[in-house]
Image (cartoon, rainbow, N blue to C red):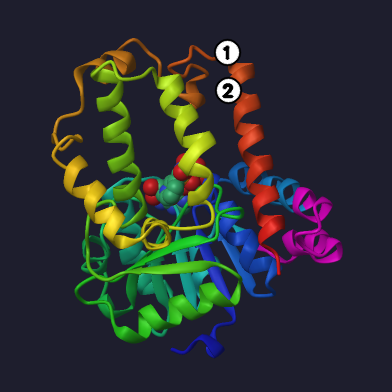
Amino acid sequence: MGVDEIRRVAVVGAGLMGHGIAQEFAVAGYGVSLHDLSAERLAAALAGMRANLALLADHGLVDAARAAGAPDGVRATTDLAAAVGDADVVIEAISEDLALKRDLFGRLDRLCPPRAILASNSSTFMPGQLADATARPDRVAVAHYFNPPHLLPLVEVVRGAATSEETVATLVALLERIGKAPAVVQHEALGFIGNRLQSALFREALAIVAAGIATPQDVDSVVRNGFGRRLAVAGPFEVAALAGFDLWLNVSTRLFPEIASSPEVPAWFREVVARGAQGAEAGAGIDGWTPEEAEARKRRMGEALIRIARWEQP
Ligand SMILES: NC(=O)c1ccc[n+]([C@@H]2O[C@H](COP(=O)([O-])OP(=O)(O)OC[C@H]3O[C@@H](n4cnc5c(N)ncnc54)[C@H](O)[C@@H]3O)[C@@H](O)[C@H]2O)c1
């Protein structure tokens, strides 16, 4: 199926990710169905969409009339068959549980038109782990968004061993049409691209703290106030090219033997987590944030992402 034939996108799982994913297809003018297990979840998702869209409209990032109308056009239903029976593309965003996802993919395969592409937003499961629950492995892929999905343009499109060229091309074209920035992951690799890169940085951040080189606060400051700002406009290859590959070769040759390569998570970080400091969601970061501070930091990040989106507009 080519991108021009796509009329309806169904999003299954209307939580943190699902409502933001559905919102963008609705604003772009696609027919959108949204499915979750309860009417309460669906109502919360539609309310979340309205709040997101009102904020985007306030900042001139979506047309105000479109923002106001888009959620009304969403077919929100707890009936899976009604949600996906006429879908051309399904994006699954249910809880990260392989048995649940495989069961759902089996049902989607039976309920969706044969042409439909089934894509999972899973962060950790591979297309092949879902494709073999269906009779259409060539039309199964992962479409991995980043949170918040309506503010971060990236979607990693992961090709499984059985995923067809056409499926990858159609997903990429669809995502580009609604203004996303898809990146193709050419074969199944845990962490895809983004989480592998984030984990490499986090491993070194932990190692720097473990070696007493700097505090977590100073590590964060170096990223936030230093090279992290550059990363919003240039990836690592672009940064290296701008500096000169010869210089980067020299730096890499000297530093690679010094930096972390251990497969183990450092014990001190395990202890932090065991003490109950679970990060912003639990209201307790390694700074010992209060719930109010965690909320304020989350808000500040959202506002900064909106400013970046405004600045990136043509
Ligand atoms: N949260 C993130 O930062 C993030 C980022 C990228 C990808 N993901 C992936 O997105 C998916 C969803 O994550 P989330 O953070 O939105 O979770 P969430 O808990 O906010 O939402 C999941 C929703 O799925 C619903 N659900 C569960 N089982 C279902 C079923 N069988 N049928 C229909 N609905 C069902 C739940 O009721 C819930 O509303 C996961 O696969 C996760 O790995 C999450």
Left or right of residue 99: residue 280 = right
Toward the viewer: 26 or 221?
221
Q: Which mark, residue 290?
A: 1
Question: Circles 1 and 2: CB distance less than 8 Å?
Answer: yes
Q: What is the secondary structure assignment of the residue under circle 2?
A: helix
Report how far apart the C-alphas of labels 1 and 2 lie in the structure.
Answer: 6 Å
Secondary structure under badge 1?
A: loop
Q: Mark 2 highlights which residue?
A: 294
Locate residue 85, reporting x and y percent: 50, 74
Work out whether residue 235 or residue 67 is closer to the camera in this orientation and state it. Answer: 235
Does the magenta segment cover residue 71? yes
Q: What residue type is labelled 1?
A: Thr
Q: Is residue 188 visible?
A: yes
- Mark 1 Cα-neighbour bin, 10 Å: few <14, some 14–19, many ≥20: some
Whole-percent x, y for residue 59 in the image:
80, 52
Q: Give the residue displayed 46% in from the left and 31% down from the top.
A: 222
The amino acid on which the numbered mark 2 sits, given as a three-letter code, is: Ala
Residue at image location 71% in from the left, 46% down from the top: 47
For the C terminus, the quadrant is bottom right
